[in-house]
Amino acid sequence: MKRIAVDMDGVLADVYSQFIKYHERDFGDYLKPEDLIGRSELEVFPNGRNYVTSKGFFRNAPVIAESQRVVSGLNREYDLFIVSAATEFPQSLTEKQYWLNEHFPFIHWRQMVFCGSKEIIDASLMIDDHFKNLDKFKGDTILFTQPHNLLTADTRHRRVHSWSDIEQILL
Amino acid sequence: MKRIAVDMDGVLADVYSQFIKYHERDFGDYLKPEDLIGRSELEVFPNGRNYVTSKGFFRNAPVIAESQRVVSGLNREYDLFIVSAATEFPQSLTEKQYWLNEHFPFIHWRQMVFCGSKEIIDASLMIDDHFKNLDKFKGDTILFTQPHNLLTADTRHRRVHSWSDIEQILL
């Protein structure tokens, strides 16, 4: 069965709305997705590193639209793994798994990977919003649109704008 | 550079002495390594599942003899990853990374993987004490001796009894 590695932050977990919420709390400044285009979180949010290391940032992230329904479908058809680059922030690890357990209860703990570099991941297809993960991956790739990746040419990866797009491709 | 995936529990972290210590605390019964031969932890320790889900079990595990010195050497010569099956116990994830950060400070967070199944790991060599991880691995394998694996024939994997053995093979 074809193995798919699905990213978490920016693909399942809407961490960008968390950044925007925390930033508004700190600066009274509500940033729109357009303000984030082509820029990394740590460029946009001066306190970004404090946010991601604060308790609850990952645990309380909203779920990206339609991801639960489509991932549930993928889970029936493919050898699915959720692969999150998480070890940069050790305290996030347990939070991230509890988040997955709550929002994606059909994903077994055997299907979860929390790592640093994704170079060690062996799969046929990777779905991710970061070029740094996709560029080094040997298999097929799907780039999940987020404001930060909008300005980079994506000729090497198939770009999708939603989980409905992924559903149409894979299911 | 050849990539090596090194297991944590039973290879770097001496979780067996933790089981023995907790069991003695609960039952006043000190088990020796010989008592563990050929049996899984959950067979030997009736409260084993409580131990591994209790705070501090992984965080306070002793370090296996000579592992720091030899892993430090491997880290200079190979593309090294520490790969721990950890997601069965979500609260262990952060503890395990803090343990690595303390005892193996030369291991970068990019080199850490906390997963469920190791089938998704792409490496040339895996060092592990569990057949369930080694048997499905496509690359070379080294079986690290622990009492639980002593009675199983290890014809498919090269058995070592210490980190000095690994040093002689790889360095």
Image: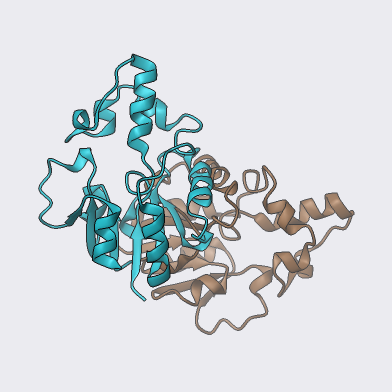
Chain colours: A cyan, B brown
A140 lies above or below B71: below
Residue ranking furthest to the right: B28
Image height check: is B85 above or below A115?
Answer: below
Quadrant for the N terminus of chain A, please. Answer: bottom left
Residue at 51%, 70% in the rendered image: B133
- Horizontal and vertical percent for residue B163? 54, 61
Q: Is residue B8 above or below residue A130?
A: below
A40 left or right, relative to A59? left
For the residue pair B22 and B65, the one nearer the viewer reads as B22
- Residue reaching furthest top? A28
Q: Quadrant of the C terminus of chain A?
A: bottom left
Residue beneath the point at 69% across and 58% down = B16
Between A166 and B2, the one nearer to me in the picture: A166
x and y percentages locating residue A67 in the rendered image: 37, 53
Residue A20 percent location from the top left of the image: 33, 27
- Number of numbered discs: 0
Query: Quadrant of residue B108 in the image?
Result: top left
Residue A111 rendering spot, x and y as whole percentages: 47, 62
Is residue B6 among what the camera can see? yes
Q: Residue B143: name its quadrant.
A: bottom right
Q: Can residue B168 be seen here?
A: no
Q: Nearer the viewer, residue B90 or A108?
A: A108
| Quarter location, residue B169 | bottom left
Which residue is pictured at 20% across the width and 28% down the height? A35
